[in-house]
Image (cartoon, rainbow, N blue to C red):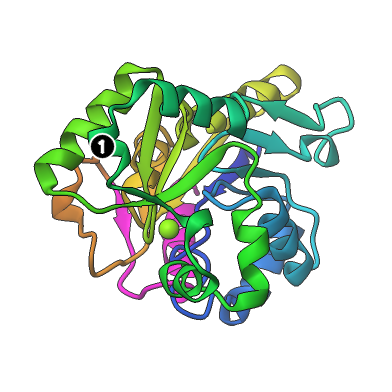
Amino acid sequence: MTPKIIIFTDLDATLLDRDTFKFDKILSYLKELILKDICIIPNSSKTRQEIEVFNKELDENLSFVVENGAAIYNLNLINSSFPEKISLSREHDEILKVFDGKISSKFKSKCKFIKNLDIKKQMAVLGLPKEKIKASLNREYSIPLLFEGSKSDKIDLFKSVNDIGLSLQEGGRVINLSDKVSKSQAMKNVVKVFKKITKEKLFTIGIGDNYNDLDMLKNSDIPCLVFNDKFTLEKININNCLVSKKPAPEGWEEVVKLALEKIK
Ligand SMILES: [Mg+2]
């Protein structure tokens, strides 16, 4: 029996070029995988609106996970008995209310919310052109920020936020304040949905490039790291992690080929 393969993948600097956000160099490979009935599920800190744009650029209707595991969309497009949406998080306003009410002003004053910066600063921080800022800040479940304090303040803030039932997730460019969600939790939920209907062996391939991908990598059958000069394998502790030599997007193709070779 051929196994069912699901690829859970981060987007920024994993599948998309870190600076240009392009992926045309691996477009034909992506199409090839989809034709082979391999499921590719973006699992990103990006918003629904942003991943829908990605789907449009790819000209496919992939199911996807938004905002670091906060919600899963479009599983019904894989199988009509699957849910259209699974939400795993409280909403944006409620998260902000808890943060505002319970975090000391000493820390809050050092948190610069991206939505409050002027457009030029937003473009610089997010590395996005003006027309993509709106989709990036149209968040349902998380609030991106910069922390302007010392390293030890940062450690204390992360702990305080954790203590009040929320979490801070560090991505490539910003820190996201969110509910206690994770990419791995969302991944496990997707797998659970699949297991309800499939008797085939399931293989998960997890692909990322940064801290906020680690739990997803640790929990996948085949963890893959796309080369990122700021985040090397020495910093993580994952057995059998495949690592690409090239950065995104070519590094994505490189590790998927290695992973599929392993499954064979
Ligand atoms: Mg990334």
Assess disc 1: are there few (<14), some (14-19) or many (≥20) residues with their C-alpha within 10 Å of its C-alpha.
some
Q: Position of residue 38 (x, y in %)?
A: 67, 50
* Residue displayed at 72% across by 45% down: 63
What residue is pinned by disc 1? 107
Q: Is residue 30 above or below residue 71?
A: below
Q: Is residue 184 above or below residue 264?
A: above
Q: Position of residue 146 (x, y in %)?
A: 34, 54
Residue 32: quarter of image: bottom right
Q: Which residues are magenta?
A: 241-264
Q: Is residue 173 above or below residue 198?
A: below
Q: Amino acid at mark 1?
A: Phe
Q: Position of residue 263 (x, y in %)?
A: 48, 46
98 or 256: nearer the eye?
98
Q: Position of residue 216 (x, y in %)?
A: 42, 38
* Residue displayed at 67% across by 60% down: 135
**18 relative position to 91: left or right:** left
* Residue displayed at 20% across by 55% down: 233
Is residue 255 within the magenta segment?
yes
Is residue 187 within the magenta segment?
no
Quarter of the image that includes the N terminus: top right
Tag 1 secondary structure: helix
Residue 4: quarter of image: top right
